[in-house]
Amino acid sequence: MLNPEHVKKTVAALKEKFPETVQEVSEFRGETTVNVAKAAIAEVCRFLRDDAALDYNVLTDLAAVDYSPEEPRFGVSYILFSMSKMARLRLKVLVPEEDPEVPTVTNVYINADWYEREAWDMMGIKFAGHPDLRRLLMPADWEGHPHRKDYPLGYEEVQFSFNWREIDAKKPYAKE
Amino acid sequence: MGLEQKLGNMGVITMTLEQAVNWGRTNAMWPMLFGLACCAMEMIAAQSSNYDVSRFGMELMRASPRQSDLMIVAGRVTRKMAPVLRRLYDQMPDPKWVVAMGDCASSGGIFNNYAIVQGVDEIVPVDVYISGCPPRPENLIYGIMKLHEKVRQEKITKWK
Amino acid sequence: MPDLSEPVLEELRHLFTARALSGETMVLNMGPQHPSTHGVLRLIVELDGETVIRAIPDIGFLHTGIEKNMESKTYIKALVMTDRLDYLNNIGNNLVYCLAIEKLMETKVPERANVLRVLMAELQRIASHLVWLGTHSIDLAAMSMLLYCFRERDYIMDIFEMVSGQRMMTTYIRPGGVWRDVPAGFTEVVENFINYLPAKLDDYERLLTNNPIFKQRTQGVGYISAEDAVKWNLAGPSLRGSGVNFDVRKAMPYSGYEQYEFDVPLETGGDVYARYRCRMREFRESLKICRQALDKLKTTKGPFITNDRKVAPPPRSELGTSMEALIHHFKLWTEGFTPPKGEVYAATESPRGELGVYLVSDGTPKPARVHFRQPSFANLQPLNYMSENHLVADLVAIIGSVDIVLGDIDR
């Protein structure tokens, strides 16, 4: 069973340790989200991991979100988990469109490597200090970042019976 | 087999070369082990005990394109995978056939988006399309039967 | 056709040791079309003779854009996409997505639906493990296992077909419950299967568990310690094979898992063999849960989907007589429902480990962002670490033992 008391304790500890960087704490459906200043995310993660009383030893998930048209446009969510204390905490960093760069947490949580690469590939958020920030899922020569809201979903028309011939005529069928 | 009635007592069958070769081609068609996504599971199911596609001379799934003459594109083909797919096709020796298994391989299926090729026929020429998401193993076997029908009707002038 | 190898190798140069550049070691490309990579995984392996120095996975050959595609559909219509993520755990994907929606909407799920969900999820776990066992042993040259395992898997596929009309992509679990109640004769079929499987499992264990060839190829291979497994955030049997007792079903029970009695198999070996043992024992635990769920199903009566018409469609029979039901039906399928603005994370235990979904709602009928926390993704990441100084043949065993599904990784 999850332990909400520990999350409360964590939030209090965070507020005490980082009074400036912890910007907003919100709770929704029993989940706590802590908004953290962009520059301090690695520091906060390191504190949460290394503090024996808090002990958030696992980064479960890292996801980038495009909140447009809201400002700042992007967000990166870090879902942390403490196996010993059974507590789940979400840290969130808001990233403006003009400067989509966040410090990496790969030196805190080793498995953040691929998650950050995915976030770069899909959302175009740079992770400063990441050892190997290449595209993860799309081909290396792909242009654009597909999960951004302004990136079109697809570009091929769907064939129906009324426009079958029309599309069939211009479809690039392969030759032997 | 019913063959012995045709043999008479001379041990000779008369048929055209076209028929003989086409017959041979249909009954020893080696598919390439080319599983991409969900459909691959049903392709393996078709191979295994319950459906047993080896009844039609297809017990060998070759991992190498050089040894196979049927490519079953089982699953969605992404833009990243497309060049690889074409290269594998080019490596297969003639005669070769392609079966597009499932909706995604045939037309893109439910994924009309940036990542998926809208029908594998944009990359390689397809002989048989099989519908279903994923198609049942019976569907696959039926599709292969259809391909056999097609191969049996191939003309000697069109051979490769 | 563009030549794939040249530019990519140039870009990957920094990943290899200096010895590779001088030609002392060999860089070998394995995949994306390779019989033992379990799908379209590409591995770039640096070899010293036959010893692996580096094994860099290159993924994305099955990137389907499902997360993006789901943003363009209403919540309920996006459900069909989740089936195609991890195609060996279709029901589990439905389940986690529905749990997230229910968390967002604060929907209460009827008891019978929960029992059905657990039963289906466990059957799916058995089916998934059967595919793993078949493909993993074929990698280790035990050909007949594949045929046996797929024979058993077909029983489960038949059960799914009986319940939902589809063998694989069932979309059986819906927000608020399940699609429909089980048909007549269902309990007998499942009971038959539950009684049938244990003897077959004994057979498999006789074939593999004490088989000296199998043991030699798996014991001491792909070792990962408990600390490293936690650090790399391995999930599921891969984590428990290293002796870390973590199972989402026990740690954060969902769908009423707390009412079932089962053990979480733990092995301390941390190698391929330990993961194999762990999964083999999970088969039996899953059967145990199935049996309990089946008993519960007999006693639990009531609706199989919530009465909340905002989330679940009204039954067909009401449509002919009730105008209100008709409106609800129309609204649900055209417009969908509108959850409040917020973000939730729901987690389940898939056959491969913790499967989570991070769902962001912006107060419209379509999800603003869906991100799946995929267990295969987490399990593949330390491959380079696990396969260091092993042989190429062991690399194949390691990939099989973490049970990756490429649809799960690439999404």
Image: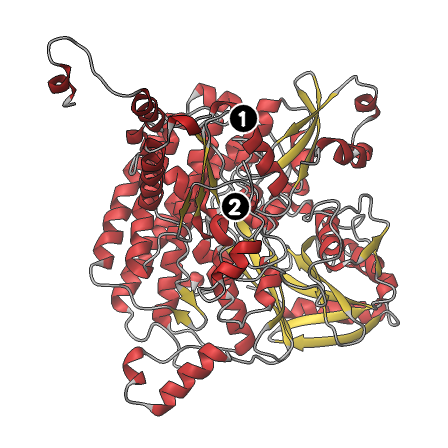
Q: Which residue is mark 1?
A: C219
Please state, as top left, top right, bottom left or bottom right, where the N terminus of chain C lies in the image.
top right
Q: Residue B97 vs residue B19: left or right?
A: right
Residue C225 rendering spot, x and y as whole percentages: 64, 37
**Mark 2 secondary-structure assignment:** helix
A116 or C192: which is nearer to us?
A116
Tag shown at residue B121: 2
Q: Residue at x 39, y 67 (%)?
A: C114
Q: Residue C330 vs residue A89: left or right?
A: left
Q: Residue at x 43, y 73 (%)?
A: C176
Picture layout, residue C213 above or below residue C201? above
Residue B60 visible in the shown view: no
Indicate the quadrant where residue A40 lies: bottom right
Indicate the quadrant where residue A71 lies: bottom right
Picture layout, residue C368 above or below residue C349? below
Q: Please give the chain letter of the residue carrying mark 1.
A: C
Residue B83 rendering spot, x and y as whole percentages: 63, 39
Tags 1 and 2 both on a single chain? no
> The disc labelled 1 sits on which kind of residue?
Gln
> The disc labelled 2 sits on which kind of residue?
Asp
